[in-house]
Amino acid sequence: MPVNEQNLIDDLSAMVQIPSPNTFGHDDPTHPAEAAMADYFEKRLNDLKLDVETVEVADGRRNVWGRLKGTGDGPTIMLAGHLDTVGVAGYETPYEPRHKNGRIYGRGSCDMKAGLVSYLEVVRLLIESNEPLKGDLIIAGVIDEEHAMIGSKHFGEHGPHVDYAIIAEPSSLAVSPKHRGQINLSIRTAGLSAHSSMPENGINAIYHMGAIINAIQTYAEELTKRTPDPMCGTPTCSIGVIKGGENVTSIPGFCEIEVDRRTIPGENFDSVLEELTEILDLLAKDIPNFEYEFLPPNLNTPPLSTDLVSPIVRSIIESCEHVTGIPPEIIPFPGSTDAPNFGCPSVICGAGALAQAHSLNEFVEISEIKSAVEIYIRAIRSMQN
């Protein structure tokens, strides 16, 4: 049964028209970020007669999923994606979908409403085939991927059991069984405020942070010399934000930086925190009145490390080659994703180029969405044998 291109165009156009930008921690409970998208996705899942469930994760922001029941003697496979997008500052007409030259333009078209649309078509085709799956198929839309990934974390901890998952992040149909993890945390130094005309009466928190910055730069350089993961490469560390002091005529009583640490398989939050603590404790021995603290991380996503011989990886690779006629690229996904939070062997493969995600002229090729649908159906069926 062929993929219905008009279904893809209609659903994706409707989704693009629904604003769902992540507020990055500045939530408005009266206008939850993904509320309208969750409503639309829930309706479409109900239209397909799935067993639909939803749960509020935070302030009206809710995960939504539907289940296509199998006969009960096969694995439960999930197709999962996020309901939120990045913001639209500087983007002209982000919520006016345009269909041009075989593409759909608009915010979220690529990242990753195209993935959600492909899942709906997968379910429609499976139902109309009248060939029941052995195992259940779950279609899930989760919140907050673009910020702290609280939706996928909640799903992994409290959602239904899943044996394998496919996540349609835009990969240009490359297969990504691995990616680095991401830890975002803040380090704060405490000083003592005083009038800048009498600096000897204060403790300059910015000077102390300067020592930390130099030490972290050395640490970041050392990370590049570590033994790389065969696919993910070496870990990295960078400082992206710094703030401190209240005015130029006062000795600053505080300074704070935000650190981005990318982890490779074998590393975790505790091991990274131990390394950073060791570095900062050495500074404290040499610098008088040196005080620091780590603030709770606003993002702590582990690496994705699905074995290449996992059934989900093998089935996706074979399906990609069958549908496209060429062996797919097998690469690490460049960014972090919801995938590791689901707690099962997962693989990333989706329509759209990552270069289009977050851009001010976002688009996705409709032909790639069609291919993705065919790939997912073939992979799902092969996993049932």
Image: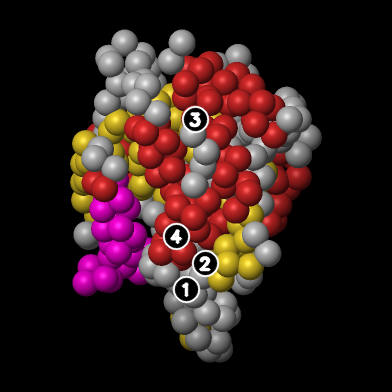
Indicate the amino acid at tag 2.
Answer: Arg
Q: CA distance from mark 2 to mark 3?
A: 27 Å
Pointer 2 local density, CA inside 10 Å: few below 14, some 14–19, many at least 20: many
Mark linked to residue 10:
4
Residues at circles 2 and 1 in contact by the CB criterion of under 8 Å = yes
Kindly state the secondary structure of the residue where label 2 is placed. Answer: loop
Q: CA distance from mark 3 to mark 1?
A: 30 Å
Please tell me how many numbered marks the rendered image carries.
4
Where is residue 182 drawn, in percent x and y? 54, 44
Indicate the amino acid at tag 3.
Answer: Ile
Q: What residue is drawn where x is 65% and y is 59%? A: 102
Instruction: Identify the residue under disc 1.
Output: 95
Earlier-in-chain disc, 2 versus 1: 1
Instruction: Identify the residue under disc 3.
Output: 377
Kindly state the secondary structure of the residue where label 1 is placed. Answer: loop
Indicate the amino acid at tag 1.
Answer: Tyr
